[in-house]
Image (cartoon, coloured by chain):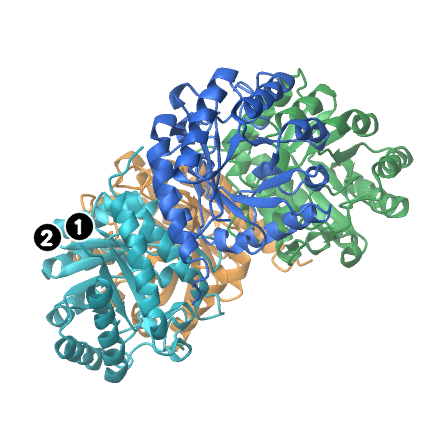
Chain colours: A blue, B green, C orange, D cyan
Amino acid sequence: ADKPVLFAGPCVVESMDICIEIGSRAKTLAKQIGFEYVFKASFDKANRTSSGSFRSIGMDKALGVLEEVGKALDVPLLTDVHESSQIKEVAKVVDVLQIPAFLCRQTDLLLAAGESGKAVKIKRGQFMAPEDMRFAVDKIRSTGNDKVCLTERGFSLGYHNLVVDMRALPIMRQFAPVVFDVTHSVQQPGGLGGSSGGQREMAPYLARAAGAAGVDGFFIETHPDPSKALSDGPNMVPLAEMEAFLSMIKEAWLLGEKYKGFKI
Amino acid sequence: ADKPVLFAGPCVVESMDICIEIGSRAKTLAKQIGFEYVFKASFDKANRTSSGSFRSIGMDKALGVLEEVGKALDVPLLTDVHESSQIKEVAKVVDVLQIPAFLCRQTDLLLAAGESGKAVKIKRGQFMAPEDMRFAVDKIRSTGNDKVCLTERGFSLGYHNLVVDMRALPIMRQFAPVVFDVTHSVQQPGGLGGSSGGQREMAPYLARAAGAAGVDGFFIETHPDPSKALSDGPNMVPLAEMEAFLSMIKEAWLLGEKYKGFKI
Amino acid sequence: ADKPVLFAGPCVVESMDICIEIGSRAKTLAKQIGFEYVFKASFDKANRTSSGSFRSIGMDKALGVLEEVGKALDVPLLTDVHESSQIKEVAKVVDVLQIPAFLCRQTDLLLAAGESGKAVKIKRGQFMAPEDMRFAVDKIRSTGNDKVCLTERGFSLGYHNLVVDMRALPIMRQFAPVVFDVTHSVQQPGGLGGSSGGQREMAPYLARAAGAAGVDGFFIETHPDPSKALSDGPNMVPLAEMEAFLSMIKEAWLLGEKYKGFKI
Amino acid sequence: ADKPVLFAGPCVVESMDICIEIGSRAKTLAKQIGFEYVFKASFDKANRTSSGSFRSIGMDKALGVLEEVGKALDVPLLTDVHESSQIKEVAKVVDVLQIPAFLCRQTDLLLAAGESGKAVKIKRGQFMAPEDMRFAVDKIRSTGNDKVCLTERGFSLGYHNLVVDMRALPIMRQFAPVVFDVTHSVQQPGGLGGSSGGQREMAPYLARAAGAAGVDGFFIETHPDPSKALSDGPNMVPLAEMEAFLSMIKEAWLLGEKYKGFKI
């Protein structure tokens, strides 16, 4: 592609207003700076550490909001799926089905996603060797669907910590396009005692690094006020910083793209 | 309890004959050596690394075999569940629902399992801090179901490798009884290029260590001929070795039990 | 051997009184419970995280204390060496030279230790695959000295954390006798911001586990008042708890010894 | 600084001819592309995995070669030191003393290096939390010597594997300038059974990533024929590729420099 893809939005569908505010700004910036834009929001946070955390405004309502956002802003949509039974309904609304990292080896979910005909974005499990993501890609392709990409979001490193191994990017690009997940790569799973913490301050360094190493796109969760976001606030990029952030990572991406074929 | 629990069986329901052969031998040994026995077999291997590997003889057929085995041998049954929609049907047949490690944070699956009223055995994710398993236990208990136990099966350690952190055992026993999974703790995920390898030779050391550190039970996959097992053969305990193996880990368990309250 | 070896003492030579108090008690307990006893104390903490931490009462003075302790209690002595130039002087006083974990690949230090003719105890580096410790053993043996043993004290696991991989014990026992370091295995390197923290409460679990997996000895730092110890207090076994602790790990060792040849 | 530093040379002093060939080419390229150049070669490989591997042509001879190279090419010199007793002699010849990663907590070595008045370059241990390198820097500064920099070369990740955590770069830059070690970051310790393997093909990705994240310099081992290099050949950048490689990482460095102050 001549432009990187940008998946951006709130972590979860909070309300129509928030989605429109974030999506319209992200769309404008993507056009201005040069990204293919896809609006992202989860309809349900199905794997919160603790059951006391916010999950969803309800699947039907959230999918309704997503559909409205897509129409109002004329943008493609991405959301996560968690069980194969959800895929039919979700695929009616969105353009890209995202397979959560924990679920990247659930064969039924992958096959159902592939069979929907929609694009499928698979997050590398925090426990998966990058070379083994080839088999996840193969599961999608076995359905005749070639619209598949992978996502890097860090390895488990001990307790409440993740590390991004940049080697995963070129390894996985052998199999499919690769997106760097800026937000979850700086997560600290369970780090706040029952909910996940994050190191937002590390996002610029990792995002520049990943862009320069070489990727096909970026995934960023953003919010006008991350401290009030219902999920993953500590690792989000504030909406007001997105213009500068996107300009920066676009430059990093151009560098990675220039040296894409460089081998020693 | 005055005896440890033994969950043992083939990895997957291969055939009635194999299940009866393994289950009857395991039941006999458990009685002889002193374990509470539960027959274990998966009805479906839903997260194989590669889609080319064996999954199942079919859910209905496999559940039918399980039911027959339970009746024929008069033993309780355990099997894995992968999506919440399966739980109603599976819970009709088995006594213990096992939540796979990758799925230990899927709230819907945990809640549905809890609501079934059956005992629920949750494997610690290879990416989860042991102290965060408290929240998984809480999800089950929030349904009013207190029959929940946890399982240790190793942390991701880099590429194609797991490490068992024995600290996880006392940490998790604060929340619920803990089972040591002898078989998957010596797995090498994706280590054979598209399927998982294993280090069966390490099983005696880790099982003795876990027993002495202190656990409430053991989980062991076994087969009369592991080289022909349809899944996880490289890390199984051969059925012919089970008598000696169980005697050994019973001794280790007694040691752990003796020093259960030892603190410094 | 028909008994496990016990290396025990304060972390560092603090004073003659403390050394005699600890050494005489440890000797008595070792005889009573059945260990071969070696008194352990460092003459210098040469690799403290921060230079503000206590290092030594001085090399000459500390070696003098060690020598006196050896004579007064009639026990063999172990201390660490950090540079090859120290070995000649240290070897005059002690019976066992300990190679610190960070230094387990320093060829000159290993060769000089081997050439001293004294027994050499090498700690596995927190960064070393257990199978690679074979080469460290070979360096000692290349000097014609066969009195060499290895020590397990955990792998680096991310930031400020260690994990003991019990597989390291049988792997390293292929090359030389193996000692389990109870104290440093529960260290949290740099965990207190400029000095190392520790999880003393985990020592009983790991020590039982290691004994049952199978080792040739144990290394334990102890102090009448760990909260006043000049180094590694948070992970020490209090002297008053040593009798119960040693009885417990002797039982674990007997179990490991009984099943030493058990293979599947 | 307005230019990044380049530390480059063969891994070890092999011969005068090789040193001159590499050093003159590297100096030319550094000037042409815009790096401050320092010639690097070890006088001794003091921590080879196995004692059968090449160590040195002899300390005196190797230091003599280094001195000649410095004069002939008019370039500053860097070499490693392993014991504090070596520092006086080595400091007569070189401008920068490098502390090996395994030795980054050896207080005597750090203090002696600091007291030499020479610049000191400390490699982060594969086992050290980046924030704890502050204490290593403090040890140098406590001698009144402020010429100190740090180096990133990866964390231990399990057996025979390293992972570079790019977060270490901004963390350590809080304390001192940081150099990215391109060569050792792609090492596979002990990965060839008694000697270390490497993933040269990963060097371009990690070097671009580190440059874009932000560093003050790069460390690269190079050789006209890496397959014949006496140490670390599998992870070296071939001399013939250095021009393209340096141009590429200079661009990455400029990007990192441009966004040095970028915070969210």
Q: Quadrant of residue A223?
A: top left
Q: Is residue C95 visible?
A: no
Q: Is residue B59 visible?
A: yes
Decide: few, some or many residues near mark 2? Use Cα within 10 Å; few <14, some 14-19, many ≥20: some
Nearer the observer, A47 or D36: D36
Decide: few, some or many residues near mark 1? Use Cα within 10 Å; few <14, some 14-19, many ≥20: many
Q: What distance separates the C-alpha of mark 1 from that of mark 2?
A: 7 Å
Letter of the chain that mark 1 sits on in the rendering? D
In screen coordinates, is C13 left or right of A194? left
The answer to whether D55 is drawn above or below residue B26 in the figure is below
Q: Quadrant of residue C195?
A: top left
Question: Disc 2 designates what residue?
Answer: D143
Letter of the chain that mark 2 sits on in the rendering? D
What element does badge 1 sit on?
A: helix
| Residue C141 x/y as whole percent | 41, 74
Question: Disc 1 designates what residue?
Answer: D139
Nearer the observer, B248 or A168: A168
As shown in the figure, which amino acid type bears the numbered disc 1?
Lys
Q: Tag on residue A158? A: none
As shown in the figure, which amino acid type bears the numbered disc 2?
Thr
Q: Quadrant of the C terminus of chain B?
A: top left
Residue at horizontal 58 percent and vertical 43 percent from the top: B210
Residue at horizontal 89 percent and vertical 44 percent from the top: B16
| Co-location on one chain, circles 1 and 2 | yes
The answer to whether C93 is drawn above or below residue C53 in the figure is below
The answer to whether B84 is drawn above or below residue D17 in the figure is above
| Contact, mark 1 vs mark 2 (Cβ under 8 Å) | yes
Nearer the observer, C74 or B70: B70
| Residue A84 x/y as whole percent | 71, 33
Nearer the observer, C215 or C192: C192
Residue at horizontal 79 percent and vertical 44 percent from the top: B29
Q: Quadrant of residue C81?
A: bottom left
